[in-house]
Amino acid sequence: MKICMYGSGNKKTPKKYTDVGYKLGLAIAEKGHSLVFGGGNDGMMGAVASGVFDNGGEILAIFPDWIMEFDDEFKNCSQLIKTSSMDERKKLFLEKSDVFVICPGGFGTLDELFEVLTLKYLHRHSKKIIIFNIDNFYDDLISILDEMHDDGLIREGALDIFDVADSIDDIFQLIY
């Protein structure tokens, strides 16, 4: 299975997240899956990719050719696809992945999360989306989504299009 991981690429990402990210990468490789991600060397991206690489897993990085103005590139990818835009990148993430795991991150991570949520909400794909709520990182976002649902801003049942996992074991139980 090709697991797409969205998450921070920031060098300042707290260790409490990157330590769990590394273990997620190890689990992806140990279970015989491959990683699809944004190609960054730092933050959650680098941690998960390092865990996959260190355990002999396959890694596909997809990023715009200009993104390295902002992030350092993870050098140990099995395959690399460069794009001309973030939109093209997100389209390829959707095409090349079987499941999405959303780790702690910033603007880019939220953009990617809401892209796959919106497309699933509009029946453009049926792939599993799992929000990895490490150390309750996404509690406030989930609360806002619940409020949006309760206020009638999103359709009944819309919150059923994603799952929330609090542990790596939870992620793999949800995938299978």
Image: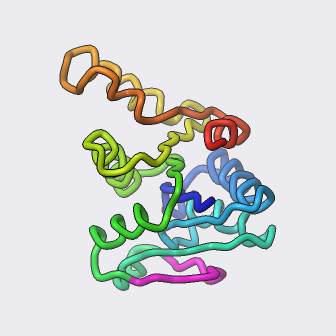
Q: Which residues are magenta?
A: 72-82
What secondary structure do most residues of the magenta stretch adopt? loop
Name the residue located 53 percent from the left edge and 52 percent from the top edge. 99
Pick the quarter of the image with the N terminus: bottom right
Name the residue located 50 percent from the left edge and 51 percent from the top edge. 100
Name the residue located 28 percent from the left edge and 76 percent from the top edge. 85
103 in magenta: no
Name the residue located 74 percent from the left edge and 52 percent from the top edge. 23
Viewer-proximal residue, 63 or 30?
30
Q: What x and y, as percent, mark residue 2?
A: 59, 62
74 in magenta: yes
Q: What x and y, as percent, mark residue 95?
A: 41, 66
User: Hey, which quadrant is residue 161 in on the image?
Assistant: top left
User: Hey, which quadrant is residue 118 in on the image?
Assistant: top left
Q: What x and y, as percent, mark residue 82?
A: 41, 84
Viewer-proximal residue, 94 or 41?
94
Side of 127 where 52 appears, left or right: right
Side of 66 where 12 appears, left or right: right
Q: What x and y, as percent, mark residue 101?
A: 54, 49
Pick the quarter of the image with the C terminus: top right
Side of 89 where 134 appears, left or right: right
> Compared with residue 154, is residue 31 higher up or lower down, i.e. above or below?
below
User: Hey, which quadrant is residue 35 in on the image?
Assistant: bottom right
> Compared with residue 53, is residue 11 higher up or lower down, i.e. above or below?
above
Q: How is colour applied across the structure in the image?
A: rainbow
> Compared with residue 14, is residue 78 higher up or lower down, i.e. above or below?
below
